[in-house]
Amino acid sequence: MLFGVSAVVTGVLLGWGVSGLQAFGDFNGEYGQILNGVAGRERHVTNVVAAVVFDYRGFDTLGEDFILFSAVLGVALLLREARDDRERPRDEVRSDAVRAFGLAMVAPTVVFGLYIVAHGYLTPGGGFQGGVALAAGLILLYAAGGYRAFRAATPHRLVDLAEGTGAGGYAAVGVASLVAGSLFLQNVIGLGTKGTLAAGGTIPLLNAASALAVAAGLILLCHEFLEEVMYEE
Amino acid sequence: MIPLQVVALALVGLGALAVVTTRDPLRQTLVAGLYGLALAVLMVVLQAPDVALSEIVVSSVASPFILLTALAKLQRRRTRK
C-alpha cells in the first residue's frame, strides 16, 4: 500500500521532471560556455575541468579534500589498534593465474596512475582519478602477492605522512598565496607555456597535493579494513 | 542521440536491473563492478572521460574491495558461531 502510493507519487514527479528537460545533448549552461572560452587563455591549461577544479573552484576542492581526509581519519580512529608488525599474518595467493596476471598488472597500473596525475591538467584525468588509480595499483599487490607484500610496499608511517602532506599541502598552497599578498588559493605563480607540464601556475601543485591525499587515503582505508579481516580476535 | 549512446544507455539499464535482481551479496558485488564498467562506457560515449576514469577505478577496485572485506569479516563471524 505504502509502496504503491510512493511509487505513483514518484512516477508522477519523475514524468513531470522529465517532460521539462531540454533536448538530449542540448547544453546551454552559461557558466560552462564562458569557462570553455576563457580557461585556456587565462590559465594556460588544456583541460578545462582541471582549471575549474583546481583554480576557479579551488576552494570547493579544498573542502572535498578535507571531507576525504576526515573520513579516512575517522576510519583510522575507529579501527586502528596497536599491533606488532613482526607478527603480521601470512596468507597465500592460491591461484597461479591471479598471481601472474596481478603481478604483471601492478607496475603498469601504478605508472598509469602517475601518468593520469602528471597530465591531469593537460588531458583528461587529474589528481583524484590518478590518485585512485595509483592506490588501486598498490592494492593489486595485495590481491596478487598477499597481505605481507602489500604492507611491506606501503609502510604505515609513509602512508600517514603522505596523507597529511597531501591534505595539508593543498591548504598550504592557499596560505602561500595569502602570504604573497593575494586572495586565498588565488593563482599567483607564473602560468608557463600552454600545454606543457609546467603550465597552469598553482594548478599542478594542487593537483599533486590532492593526488597524494587521495592515494594515501585509499591505501590507509585498505590497511584498516584488511587488519580487521586478517587478524583473528 | 547516436546509436552508440543508445546501446550504452541500454547496457546501464540492464546492468542496474542485474544488480538489484542478484540476491547473493558476493555475486552482487561482482555484478555491481560490471555495472560500474557499463556506466564508465556510457560516460566515455557522452564525452566525459574525466568522470569515466574515476568511475572505472572506484567501481572496479575501491568499492568491491570495501564490500568484499566486509563480507569476509561477516562470513568469518558466522562460521565461528
Image (cartoon, coloured by chain):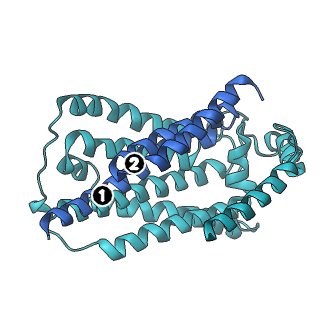
Chain colours: A cyan, B blue
Residue A133 appears at what percent x and percent y?
45, 43
Residue B37 appears at what percent x and percent y?
51, 37
| Image quadrant in which the N terminus of chain A is located | bottom right
- Image marks 2 and 1: residues in contact by CB distance under 8 Å: yes
Q: Which mark is residue B29?
A: 2
Q: Is residue B57 left or right of residue B30?
A: right
Residue B30 occupies which quadrant of the picture? top left
Instruction: Name above or below for residue B46 compared with residue B62.
Output: above
Q: What whole-number distance in Å separates the C-alpha atoms at marks 2 and 1? A: 10 Å
Query: Which is more N-terminal, label 1 or label 2?
Result: 2
Callout 1: helix, strand or loop? helix
Between A176 and A186, the one nearer to me in the picture: A186
Q: Which mark is residue B71?
A: 1
Dot 1: chain letter: B
Q: Residue furthest top?
A: B3
The residue sitting at 84% across, 56% down in the picture is: A16
Instruction: Name above or below for residue A85 compared with residue B19.
Output: below
Instruction: Name above or below for residue A133 compared with residue A205.
Output: above
Residue B51 appears at what percent x and percent y?
62, 43
Between A225 and A31, the one nearer to me in the picture: A225
The residue sitting at 53% across, 40% down in the picture is: B15
Dot 2: chain letter: B
Between A68 and A163, the one nearer to me in the picture: A68
Q: Dot 1, crowdedness within 10 Å: few (<14), some or many (≥20)?
A: some
